[in-house]
Image: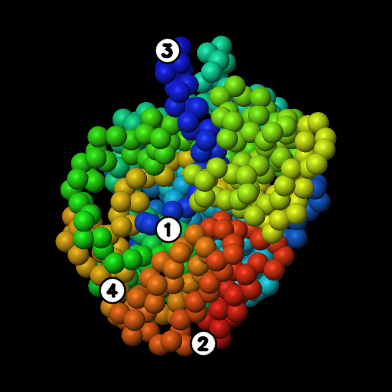
Amino acid sequence: MRSTRHALLPALLALLALLAGACSDDDGDGATPTEPAEESRGDERSGEPATPDLEPRVVTYEGAPTDAPDEYDVVTVVEQGDPDAENVLVLVPGTSAGAGYFLPLGEDIVTAAPDWQVWSVDRRENRLEDHSLVDRRRSGEAESQEVFDYYLGWIADDTISPHFEPPTDDEVAFARDWGMAVAVEDLHVVVEEAASRGGSVVLAGHSLGGSITIAYATWDFDGTPGYEHLDAIGLIDGGSRPLDPEADVEAQLAELQEGTPFNDLLGVGLPWAPGVFNVLGATGVLLEPDEPSIAYEFPLLPDALKPPVRPTNAAQYGYALDVDTSPPNLALVHLSLGSLAEEGDPRGWVDDGAVPLERAARMFAGIEGIDGTAWYHPLRLTLDGGYVNLGNANPAQDRLGIRAIHGPDLSLPIYAFETGFGEGRVLAGARLLAEQAGIPEDDLTLVERHEVTHTDPMAIEPDNPLVETLVPFLESVAAR
């Protein structure tokens, strides 16, 4: 293992520049539920019991059958709100994002709209993650240095054992087939369960989750369009666009068969590392915000992510993600956070931005067994997202097993929210989706907030423009 570790060092140097890269990328039949993983949780930050209706409930369902081991044919849902509320908003995360990403947003929505539940989907790929030590740290059974060494320190120090053992590409070759068809069929289980509550069901996705939302709404389920299971859809800084005429599906599939099944930001076989860095950094903010940052002292951390002075855990994490100090290649997860304190050793963080640092950390730290990232995002899902084509049939769909063909007859109210990151693409795509189906203008709600980042809408507090516009839309849907 010594030679393997040393071979990883140059890759890790570059990878650390993608710290917190668990993010989204806008380009892109009924089953029996198993036992809930854990029905309620207290507030781990204050020690106070959480308001009952805001306590996340984790439920797993049997997903679509595939060639993967049965343990992966599972879809997990984090539910928030009154369990007796009949209306359900199902949220779909984007590229390399997990259900924890929506937890603060979900709290805000169910507080403002108590007749609604929020169900956040944690896709099957997240079952590949190893939360063992980070969950022990969450419960106070492991120390910060022990956790850091388990997940990352071993790469630079071959005396550390036991440590995290990422699966090899051969061990997870089945994930090369985890594309849009698998994601949509898994999602169908969740939507059908939500519909069984008897109220309205709205499906909404952030970034690539918007593409998945459109795919589901226009999917052909043995002759029944997916939109017949829904009352509306929401596109949060994501969606679909017309097919790229230059796209070569055969070349893309061939490339996928030769490399890792997962989104590998560097192409060096470390797809899991951005998610690990993010969850460790976020957990440090929540549990030990004022302690000196371990990551800052790590010899492989690049200067681009280092504050000019020795930081606390909170300051290191905030500096790495804040829109004013984070490197440009992290634009997908930039947040309007705050600034370094003017003095102190270690230097702390000042919350003077639109997004409180604690809320950002809660997004990515998540809860036991579930964080806000996806350590292993299937490349096939991103590939397939490029061929949804606003729900219009095309030859590549036949090759990929995609059945998003009911775009022209879509009949649903549409909500679309665009940030500055969208640069006009999101709202333009929503208009095309409505125009091709003849959806009336009154059923189209378009919101433009170019002053916020791609990730800000998940965590702005107070006066979140997403909450302020999405909640009235949900209420209008329920009243129809």
Residue 56, horizontal then vertical, whole percent: 64, 56
What is the basis of the colouring in this image?
rainbow
Residue at horizontal 53 percent and vertical 72 percent from the top: 448
Say which element carries label 4.
loop
Report the Cα–Cα distance between label 1 and label 4.
21 Å
Say which element carries label 3.
helix
Q: Is residue 276 visible?
A: no
Q: Specify whether 249 is left or right of 430.
A: left
Q: Name the residue tied to disc 2.
A: 480
Mark 3: give few (<14), some (14-19) or many (20+) Cα within 10 Å: few
Q: Mark 1 vs mark 4: which is more N-terminal? A: 1
Q: Is residue 36 above or below residue 478?
A: above
Q: Is residue 159 above or below residue 408?
A: above
Q: Name the residue tied to disc 1.
A: 26
Three-letter residue code for mark 4? His
Residues at marks 3 and 1 touching, judged by CB atoms closer than 8 Å: no
Three-letter residue code for mark 1? Asp
Q: Mark 2 vs mark 3: which is more N-terminal? A: 3
| Foreground pick, 344 / 88 | 344
Report the Cα–Cα distance between label 4 and label 2.
23 Å
Q: Name the residue tied to disc 3.
A: 3
Report the Cα–Cα distance between label 2 and label 3.
64 Å
Residues at marks 4 and 2 touching, judged by CB atoms closer than 8 Å: no
Residues at marks 1 and 2 touching, judged by CB atoms closer than 8 Å: no
| Foreground pick, 434 / 350 | 350
Query: Comparing marks 2 and 3, which lies closer to the viewer?
Result: 3
Q: Name the residue tied to disc 4.
A: 406
Mark 1: give few (<14), some (14-19) or many (20+) Cα within 10 Å: many
Three-letter residue code for mark 3? Ser
Image mark for residue 401: none
Three-letter residue code for mark 2? Arg
Say which element carries label 2.
loop
